[in-house]
Amino acid sequence: MRLMIVGNLEGYISQAGKIALQRGAKVVHCEDIDQAIGALLNGKGADLAMVDVKQKIDKFIARLEEERIHIPVVACGIGSDARAAVKAIQSGAKEYIPLPPDAELIAAVLEAVTQESSDMIASDPAMQAVVKLADKIAPSEATVLITGESGTGKEVMSRYIHNKSKRSGGPFIAVNCAAIPENLLESELFGHEKGAFTGATARRIGRFEEATGGTLLLDEVSEMHPQLQAKLLRAIQEREITRIGSNDAVKVNVRIVATSNRDLEKSVEKGEFREDLYFRLNVVNLRLPALRERPGDIPRLAQFFADKYAEVNGVPKKRLSNEAENKVKTAHWRGNIRELENTLHRAILVSMEEELEADAIHLQEGFSDSPAVKPARPAASSAGTGAPSVANPGAVESLIGRRIADVERDMILNTLDHCLGNRTHAANILGISIRTLRNKLNQYKDEGIDVPASAG
């Protein structure tokens, strides 16, 4: 557990740091948010930031997002200042801690940050077999490739392996290769020197260096551009990286865990993924079963999420009724654990009974098996501006309750159909890059969905 404390607070903040140290945390102290951002960019990683409310927390969180640094932020201030606490939470802080610090409260916050990956719900034989293999290979230094459908918990399994490994005392750094723009991913992984490119106003330590001594998760590695795949292969083989704008090699000591929801062997056959990198990553393969393949775990997972979101939203915890339990066990769960979590979050909010009733569990089964619905064309704007018409509000209402991923899929496929399969034309209409469109279409093909033949 790495704690970054930002601010002064008349010495109380150092008391909080001492308590955290006694609880086993590694603590770094920064005077202000600029120093904190500089430390993070130069490799001083943190799992939690505790920030004085007198600091500009909104600016700090905005900088974290800008630099793609994912750290939960907790605000702290002298006494129980309700106004300061509300402002901090509105700025994006996860919690407010009054000072002088209470040892038990500090311990609870640290535990809340670290507990999410300490346990694995695996009662079903299909999942028990995977966890048994994970336990066996976790203490080794072997590279692990975790595969499975979207939403099956690949990142959770990655953290589980890290926590069970000899590197558990080191950092766990995750990089989502699909979420970071192609032209920024190299800098994200390997870092850059000041002036290396436009906008590089300071040196930045990459994720490989930040993860030294720990584990580096390459999430959705199949989305990485082939040119960058070659550099990644060299970094893994040679255990060294070179920052952009530098000629000096830097030794790194990381364990690689990679994930993908694609069939990488097919991607290799299509020339979309390097074969040598695939073999380098696939030393140990863990395939996570889809949720429908591990029905024995569904009730426990459902109750876990129901309890979790009852606590988050300040509502009473409720046990799933027998009818509700049967309903979740027999559902298809196309979105796997992620869909189950969202469904139980909504259910605990709308439930009207003492037990969580079946009617509160709203499923999307009808949409997953039905053909894509062709959206009605918007009426022309009377002003001739091309602005969307709201003359047919029912078209919008029909989207309520649908998953964003399903709506996006229908929009992409319908647009492609309208363009008679022309990828370039469809990408221009959708406002996305041709690479993003192709990645989406490949995903749909892997899911067994018919995609119009290419016409450009």
Image (cartoon, helix red, strand yellow):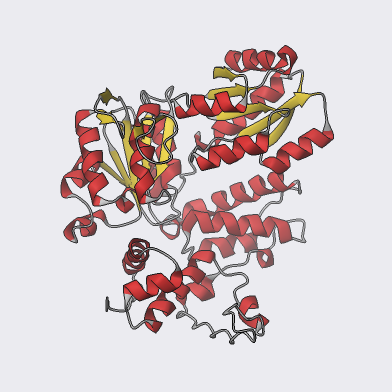
- Above or below, comparing residue 76 to residue 218 in the picture: above
| Rendering quarter of residue 399 | bottom right
Of 240 and 129, nearer the camera is 240
Q: Residue at x 39, y 30 (%)?
A: 194
Q: Position of residue 67 (x, y in %)?
A: 49, 39
Q: How many marks?
A: 0
Q: Position of residue 70 (x, y in %)?
A: 52, 38
Q: Residue at x 17, y 59 (%)?
A: 269
- Above or below, comparing residue 353 to residue 283 in the picture: below
Q: Position of residue 207 (x, y in %)?
A: 38, 33
Of 111 and 453, nearer the camera is 453
Tell me the quarter of the image containing the C terminus.
Answer: bottom left
Q: Is residue 283 visible?
A: no
| Rendering quarter of residue 185 | top left
| Rendering quarter of residue 96 | top right
Q: Residue at x 24, y 51 (%)?
A: 226
Q: Position of residue 299 (x, y in %)?
A: 56, 53
Q: Image check: 270 left or right of 263? A: left
Q: Residue at x 19, y 50 (%)?
A: 274
Of 16 and 63, nearer the camera is 63
Q: Is residue 188 visible?
A: yes
- Above or below, comparing residue 269 to residue 421 in the picture: above
Q: Image check: 122 left or right of 103? A: left
Q: Image check: 30 left or right of 433? A: right
